[in-house]
Image (cartoon, rainbow, N blue to C red):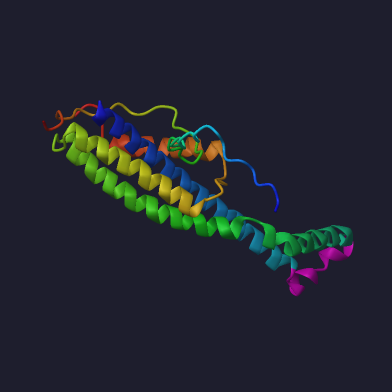
Amino acid sequence: MSQEHYWKEFYRLKVHVCYMELQLGSTESTDRALKIFLAITSSASIGGWAIWKDLASVWGAIIAASQVVNSTRQYFPYKERLRALSGLLNDLDELLIQVESRWLDISGGLLSEAEIRKALDDLRVRKLKAFKKYFPDNMIPDNGRLFQKAEEKALEYFDNFYPAEQ
Amino acid sequence: MANLPKPPSHPTPPIQRQPMVERKLPEPKKTPPMPKVLPPRT
């Protein structure tokens, strides 16, 4: 019973680690796109292209948009989110290594029921602390598409390393 | 001197320990079947 419980928590942790990895990748992409957009719109050589003589209103709109982005970007959450996700992933990766090692002991019958329950509590507490540390306001971005992808990644990992029939 | 509120006549109930709630993350839809394991040590 406790072994099954630990197995489920182990898988759950793996899914959440994959999800945070994908969140980090997505946030980095958005941040990079924003920086590229601002770099392009502030480039005098691009602004001097002959094409803009015919499309002056388009270029004007792009410049206006870039100024709005530039003046409001300090309020965008990307920078803080990047730092939080990166720190959280470090902690969760470390936890995952220890949980996986503990699972090998548990599956090999090396731990008693009481020890497994204690290991389960330890896993939950450490995971909770990591999330509280980096996302104290519980502002974890929600993205169903990324979560589905995270589940697929985790399943693939478990299929490879822990096939049901051994 | 300002009127201070009177202490409650009944004893204050003990603070209930809140159950540990994890940050709200989506839950996996299903868990892969557990591989065969040895029974826990007795």
Locate residue A91, reporting x and y percent. Answer: 38, 54
Residue at left offset 88%, top offset 65%: A53
Give the side of residue A3 with respect to residue A22, left or right.
left
Quadrant of the image occupied by residue A55: bottom right
| Residue numbers of the magenta segment | A42-54
Quadrant of the rendering where the C terminus of chain B is positioned: top left
- Which x, y percent locates residue A84? 51, 56
* Residue A161 visible in the shown view: no
| Residue situated furthest left in the rendering | B42
- Position of A144 with respect to A91 (left or right) is right
Whether the magenta-drawn stretch holds residue A47 is answered as: yes
* A68 lies left or right of A164: right
* Residue at 49% over, 41% down: B23
Query: Residue A95 at x, y = what percent?
Result: 33, 49
Q: Quick one: A51 or A155, which is closer to the camera?
A: A155
The image shows residue A87, relative to residue A165, as above or below, that is below
Look at the magenta stretch and give its main secondary structure: helix
Residue at the (41%, 39%) spot, across then down: A15
Q: Which of B42 and A163 is in front in this view?
A: B42
Task: Tell me what residue is drawn at x 48 percent, y 33 percent.
Answer: B13
The answer to whether residue A78 is magenta is no
Residue B21 at least partly seen: yes
Vertical order, A58 against A121 (above or below): below
- State the residue lying farthest toward the front: B1
Q: Which of A17 and A126 is in front in this view?
A: A126
Q: Position of residue A22 (x, y in %)?
A: 49, 47
In which quadrant of the rendered view does residue A52 lie?
bottom right
